[in-house]
Image (spheres, rainbow, N blue to C red):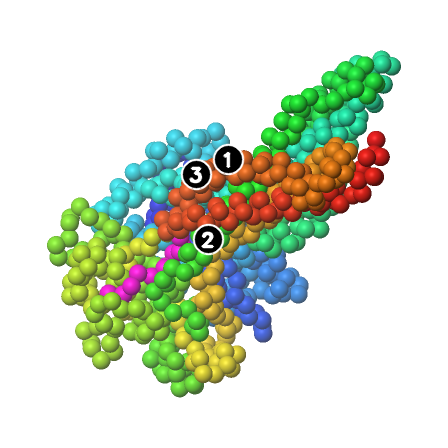
């Protein structure tokens, strides 16, 4: 189980208060840290943990002690990181950690699986080291209101997490200060098997966007497979007259209907089995492309016995689905009529085929509309006003005390003097990252029952100017005014909350107790996902701590040259750290990755659905043309034009597509509205999307049918009339 964002004392309270817990451990958030050994320097992700973490997650220790983190100055490395740093035995070697102290490698553990929550974690460090070397963390150690840690718990066997979760719900509230109680904090347990697919929380409840996506693509995949099965049914039943004599002969010589059904189902199973073998080969070859598209590391589980069990079951089910209707239909023929050649399909025999063609194009139209709406929503969010500049700006995380303690003004002056930098700022969080939150901020006239959570970012005077903040009221921070050390800049949402849009000059009291004055109001910025509403937030002056550097490069010189000069200046202050940075515009683009991946996958499925539908209608058009070949010959002899013959053969399928359009449009409207409802900031779906999709479906169907129709219409009428 896990609870996120709690005070460090929470774990000990759980263990001492509730007998249902076998083990409880606290952990820091996943963070980047510098490791140095000889001339090797690298930045990897690590966790500060309580020793019980190793037991809770069954960490497989390959070298060293089974309990490697008993000493404060110890570190455990993943086997992949160990091999990067050392050529031989790692245990007992000393590493410099974050350019501060030497830590001894006391254990090497097996890498966490690539599909696990801790996949990126390559090192584990005792929590005691974090407290011993970071004064701010030491202060937070005994502070219930410092929601900076993760808590992981292992329940005793047979204990229901639901019952325990209900019991501990009020613990966090009871231990919090009066200010934090105003936010009504609530603890709950969250099962490990739901971490990946159920990760968003709202008032303690999880919402499942990822599981909805899994279900959505699973259903789409099932529809695509169903389309292929429909093609098989359609073409088999369309060829029924061709196989009528075979059925008649087999019945005359003694075959019963059950034997015929088994024969046709066997044929279906053979086709599906061959298709499955081809599908496995294509999947194996396409897997690298799929993994790149979805940002996953999926492998085909050839060594898993259940993989073959599931595959065979799926093949069997597909064969039954595709072959059942043709088998029942073909085995029902009257043998006398079949052998006399007088068997003709009834006037309603084509009805099932028409229904299935309508179903195929309905699904295809739904997928096309869905794909277009996804891309429209992404573009709508991308066009949303951001509220800050992105181009030509880099972000650097401060990893070491050397860089954190360097004189900020001196560093800034040196960077600007190099000619490579226009401006520089420091902040706790980058503009594209998270922010701290405070629900206890007060101001004059505030409703005592109002406890909004306001996001905060401590920064240098130059942060707004470096990021290009857009002011709607007031002014920026000024270095010439000493009073600005107690100044605050807020966004429009915070201004509306605090003073109904007239918040300038209002004094705020933050959690530290210090009073600060609002001097400026900026446009709302996109700080979290661009698809949702943003929150009230504020910026205030402060230079303490590690934080991040934001550097606006000089656009008049090449980027590579500017980065080289920045690196030289940084190395003079922090020579033992790798030079790592992110471009601000690229970091902003990552906010769209999930939706863009979904859009690409939807486009692939839509393309498959259209292709399969076209193959089916192509085959049916060919069969329809062959069935009416003599009629075509007679009509040509009587003077029918190619256009008349084309329209005669094509209109039947056009009407089917028109029916599919009528059915698909209201369904698509409802489904897309439901999907868009998960986003607070969403596009209004224009009617042109439906018109364009309908026109596209008609054009595709006409092009598909026209080949067979024109081929028949251009045939020599003599050859048509000679056909049996």
Res. 225 image quadrant = top right
Residue 54 visible in image? no
> Mark 3 or mark 1, which is nearer to you?
1
- Determine the CA span between mark 2 and mark 3: 16 Å
Is disc 3 surrounded by few (<14), some (14 to 19) or many (20+) residues within 10 Å?
Answer: few
Residue bearing mark 3: 670
- Determine the CA span between mark 3 and mark 1: 12 Å
Q: Residue at x 52, y 79 (%)?
A: 560
- First to last magenta residue range: 521-531
State left or right for residue 199 relative to residue 629: left
Relative to 164, residue 438 above or below? below
Residue bearing mark 2: 376
Residue 78: mark? none
Is disc 2 surrounded by few (<14), some (14 to 19) or many (20+) residues within 10 Å?
Answer: some
Observer-nearest residue: 572 or 228? 228
Q: Earlier in the sequence, mark 2 or mark 1?
A: 2
Magenta-drawn stretch contains 522: yes
State left or right for residue 413 relative to residue 650: left
Q: Residue at x 38, y 33 (%)?
A: 164
Residue bearing mark 1: 663
Task: State yes or no: discs 3 and 1 in contact (Cβ < 8 Å).
Answer: no
């Amino acid at each position: 189980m896990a609870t996120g964002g709690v005070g460090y004392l929470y774990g000990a309270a759980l263990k001492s208060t509730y007998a249902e817990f076998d083990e409880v451990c606290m952990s820091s958030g996943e963070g980047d840290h510098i490791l140095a050994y000889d001339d090797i320097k690298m930045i990897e992700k690590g966790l500060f943990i309580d020793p019980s973490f190793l037991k809770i997650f069954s960490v497989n220790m390959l070298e060293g002690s089974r309990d490697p983190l008993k000493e404060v100055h110890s570190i455990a490395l993943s086997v992949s990181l160990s091999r990067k740093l050392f050529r031989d035995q790692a245990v007992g070697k000393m590493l410099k950690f974050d350019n501060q102290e030497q830590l001894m490698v006391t254990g090497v553990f097996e890498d966490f699986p690539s599909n696990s929550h801790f996949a990126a974690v390559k090192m584990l460090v005792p929590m005691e080291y974090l407290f011993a070397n970071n004064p701010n963390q030491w202060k937070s150690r005994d502070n219930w209101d410092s929601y900076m840690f993760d808590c992981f718990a292992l329940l005793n066997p047979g204990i229901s997490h639901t019952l325990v979760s209900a019991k501990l719900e009020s613990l966090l509230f009871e231990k919090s200060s009066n200010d934090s109680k105003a936010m009504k904090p609530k603890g709950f347990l969250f099962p490990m098997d739901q971490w990946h697919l159920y990760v968003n929380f709202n008032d303690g409840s999880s919402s499942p966007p990822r599981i909805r996506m899994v279900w959505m693509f699973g259903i789409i995949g099932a529809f695509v497979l169903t389309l292929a099965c429909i093609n098989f049914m359609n073409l088999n039943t369309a060829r029924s007259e061709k196989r009528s004599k075979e059925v008649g002969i087999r019945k005359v010589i003694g075959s019963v209907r059950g034997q015929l059904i088994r024969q046709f189902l066997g044929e279906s199973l053979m086709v599906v089995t061959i298709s499955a073998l081809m599908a496995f080969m294509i999947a194996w070859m396409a897997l690298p492309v799929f993994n790149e598209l979805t940002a996953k590391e999926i492998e085909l589980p050839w060594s898993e016995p259940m993989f073959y069990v599931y595959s065979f079951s799926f093949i069997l089910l597909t064969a039954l689905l595709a072959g059942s209707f043709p088998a029942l239909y073909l085995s029902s023929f009257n043998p006398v009529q079949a052998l006399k050649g007088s068997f003709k399909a009834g006037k309603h025999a084509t009805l099932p085929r028409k229904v299935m063609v309508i179903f195929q194009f309905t699904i295809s139209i739904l997928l096309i509309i869905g794909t277009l709406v996804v891309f429209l929503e992404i573009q709508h969010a991308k066009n949303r006003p951001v509220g800050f500049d992105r181009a030509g700006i880099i972000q650097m995380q401060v990893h070491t005390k050397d860089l954190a303690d360097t004189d900020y003004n001196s560093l800034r002056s040196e960077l600007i003097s190099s000619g490579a930098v226009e401006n520089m700022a420091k902040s706790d969080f980058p503009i594209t990252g998270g922010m701290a939150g405070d629900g206890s901020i007060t101001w004059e006239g505030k409703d005592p029952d109002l406890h909004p959570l306001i996001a905060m970012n401590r920064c240098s005077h130059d942060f707004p100017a470096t990021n290009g903040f857009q002011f709607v009221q007031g002014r920026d921070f000024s270095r010439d005014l000493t009073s600005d050390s107690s100044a605050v800049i807020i966004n429009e949402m915070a201004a509306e909350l605090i003073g109904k849009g007239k918040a300038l000059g209002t004094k705020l009291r933050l959690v530290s107790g210090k009073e600060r004055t609002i001097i400026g109001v900026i446009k709302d910025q996109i700080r979290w996902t661009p698809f949702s509403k943003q929150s009230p937030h504020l910026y205030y002056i402060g230079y303490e701590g590690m934080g991040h550097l934001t550097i606006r490069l000089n656009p008049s010189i090449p980027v590579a040259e500017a980065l080289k000069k920045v690196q030289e200046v940084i190395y003079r202050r922090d020579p033992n750290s790798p030079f790592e940075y992110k471009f601000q515009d690229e970091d902003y683009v990552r906010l769209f990755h999930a939706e863009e991946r979904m859009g690409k996958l939807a486009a692939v499925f839509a393309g498959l659905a259209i292709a399969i539908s076209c193959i089916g209608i192509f085959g049916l058009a060919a069969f329809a043309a062959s069935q009416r070949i003599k009629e075509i010959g007679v009509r040509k002899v009587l003077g029918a034009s190619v256009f008349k013959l084309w329209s005669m053969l094509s209109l039947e399928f056009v009407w089917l597509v028109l029916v599919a359009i009528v059915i698909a449009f209201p369904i698509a409207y409802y489904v897309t509205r439901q999907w868009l409802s998960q986003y607070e900031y969403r596009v209004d779906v224009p009617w042109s999307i439906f018109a364009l999709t309908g026109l596209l479906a008609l054009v595709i169907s006409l092009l598909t049918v026209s080949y067979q129709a024109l081929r028949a219409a251009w045939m020599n009428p003599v050859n048509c009339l000679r056909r049996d």
